[in-house]
Amino acid sequence: MSHSVTTRQPGTTSGGPALEIRGLGKSFAVGGLFSRDSVRALHGVDLSIGRGEIVALVGESGSGKSTLARCVARLEKPSSGEILIDGVDVLRRDRFQASRAFRSQLQMVFQDPFGSLNPAHRVEHFLRRSLAIHGKTGGTEKETRQRLEKLMTTVGLEADMLNSYPHELSGGQRQRIAIARALAVEPQVILADEPTSMLDVSVRIGVLNLMRKLRDEQGISMLYITHDLASARYLADRTAVMFAGELVEEGESLDLLATPAHPYTQLLVSAVPDPSRAGSYDPVRRAELRQAVMASTHCAFDGDPNQACSAEEPVRHRVGNPENRHWVRCHLYRPWAAAGGHALASEPIQPGHPASNAQEEASA
Amino acid sequence: MTISQVSFGSHEPVLDVKDLTVKYIGDTRSTTAVDRVSFSIGTGEVFGLAGESGCGKSTIANSIMRLLKDPAKIAGGSISFGGKDVLAMSPEELRRFRWQDVAMVFQSAMNSLNPVLTIGEQIVDIFTTHAGYSRKESLRRAGELLELVRIDPARLRSYPHQLSGGMRQRAVIAMAVALKPSLLILDEPTTALDVVVQQEIMAQIKELQRELGFSVLFITHDMSLMVELSHRMAVMYGGRIVETAKAQDVYATPRHPYTQALMGAFPPLTGPRVPLTGLPDGVKFRNIPDLSEVSPGHFVAPFGADAPVIESANLEGATP
């Protein structure tokens, strides 16, 4: 990969990042058996997660964030790139499928807690199985029992819920069980793909708080995949923005969302409903941003002698204070026609105001 | 003459719901989904109904449209629209009432378009069936309608699958306002859409509302979105309204603990990162009393000593 990375610092603590993704790419074949067409879902993704750090991956549907999660979880075979855990390329170590060692380092929490727990088993079964498979039972039944109860306390549930079936629990409780199941393995990294989007709004915050607590108390690193910028800001130390299969911007969450540099990030931030800035919607500005995302002709960093712009090769520009580790990909760079298939391209770009038609309609 | 034309421009409430109670009747027990709910919507007003899944907000919308099916039964109360009793309408009156007076955009309505008919055919259908226009006239109006929601009229010949999700949702909204209803019910109109598209659709609805002057009943669980769009709003819990006031008042000073929990569930996009709590798991409010006015126009169900917070997992909700 010929990426010129300007700022690339290791994780916050010593020992390098917990999870590092280098130049990850994924293409899906489309068409018939003999077709050579493919869709590029991911291209040259570089992302690292430090120990005890939560990184949010945000983007709209179809931007490739779930594909990235599936590749990192080894549910999908990446076409290119490396996935490093503790500095070891797991794609090379376990070539064909994920090994148990890998699974004990990285666990997943999925979007749908209704589908991820087998309805025929009690809660205890899920947790006990996780412990047994990864050899964490502690040997004696008494020890196992203690661990089960401790897991339940950690995720904020009563120990007597171990005897419940999934259908007896609420969505929030089920998601906590799914998290407990991941924790049983004592992983370094948890991959959470939209863990709160199917939950009722009033319990979402509780699950986010739980994830934050696990980071603070147990030093677990997380990749938090979401389309909700506000929750990314609330939970994550750093946020990375994905557009058309590539990362376009990354930085400290507060800094990134306060001063978004890429037009796409600006578009996303401006679209979040926020009563404190009600009425901020400006169709003309919106059309400009869309235009900038789909066919930018100039980059905000044009003319900066230290950071040359390029339409041919992705260049990362540093934004603001280096402490914030905030970079943005050059606006000029177009990842071939990939962006053309994005949902934004098919929406109309029309700042015009059809007031005259409306009046006719009203009087008709 | 339709009811909409009679009531338009008056200061009478367009819709008046009084003590509405809806029950789901089961073999062994019944559940009260909506419990003595009262509210009214004025001409040109956007009224928001917020709450979580299962609180009864969609059931209210379906009762207003008289779309409830067994085992749901309206067990009490009244719904009047422009002075007419909706619950006493004959099937023929209902047919005219729906769409012409009150139109509804359902959750993921964009998937409710007929996949084997073009957008144009589906809009023309509305005009020929409900307004009795000729085919040619209908087609002209269908084109105008699409322009109103900023879709190229050439798209009349497109099939639904040829449009993006946002465009389909826009087309559905255009169809809903085709007959100039005086009330538009929006049941989670943007939940299936991405944020950028969501904001544009909401801006579109606001603009249409200003131009055509209809009232809106807006149902969602997203408090931020609701506060941005609504004039007045009500928060529902377990089939009851726990708080109702101007949207800005609810946003600035939520009084009921449940409203506060809902507000606390949406982290802000500006300012410092403060820990939020949301609603603790398992906390239930039961026997919610009637609303009382705490400040002008701000009604809250009394809580605290009168309505103790009980930890239980009672499925009956707020049945007294």
Image: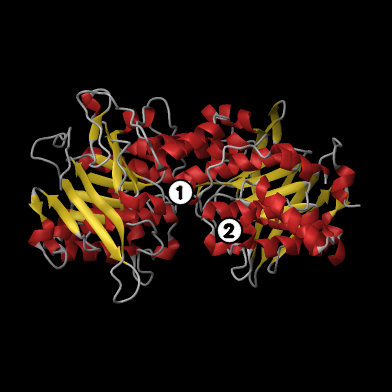
User: Which chain letter matches label 2?
Assistant: B
* Residues indicated by labels 2 and 1 sit on the same polypeptide chain: no
Give whichever of A105, B134 is nearer the camera: B134
Q: Which mark is residue A80?
A: none
Please identify the residue farthest to the bottom as the structure is shown.
A33
Circle 1: element type: helix
Q: Residue A269: tell me if it is visible.
A: yes
Q: Position of residue A301 (x, y in %)?
A: 29, 27
Q: Residue at x 69, y 64 (%)?
A: B122
User: Which chain letter matches label 1?
Assistant: A
Looking at the image, is A103 positioned above or below residue A324?
below
* Disc 2: CA contacts within 10 A as few (<14), some (14-19) or many (>=20): many
Residue B270's quadrant in the figure? top left
Residue B252's quadrant in the figure? top right
Front: mark 2 or 1: 1
Q: Residue at x 55, y 46 (%)?
A: B221
Q: Residue at x 70, y 44 (%)?
A: B216
Q: Position of residue A210 (x, y in %)?
A: 32, 44
Residue type of the residue flagged with mark 2: Met
Q: Does residue A168 appear to the left or right of B15 in the view shown?
A: left
Q: Residue at x 83, y 46 (%)?
A: A364
Give whichever of A57, A364 is nearer the camera: A364
Q: Position of residue B84 (x, y in %)?
A: 88, 51
Looking at the image, is A316 positioned above or below residue A80?
above
**Would you name the residue on which mark 1 appears?**
A345
Give whichever of A263, A201 is nearer the camera: A263
Dot 2 and dot 1 residues touching (CB under 8 Å): no
Q: Residue B66: tell me if it is visible.
A: no
**Would you name the residue on which mark 2 appears?**
B110
Give me the C-alpha separation between circle 2 and circle 1. Answer: 19 Å
Residue type of the residue flagged with mark 1: Ala
Q: Position of residue B24 (x, y in %)?
A: 66, 64
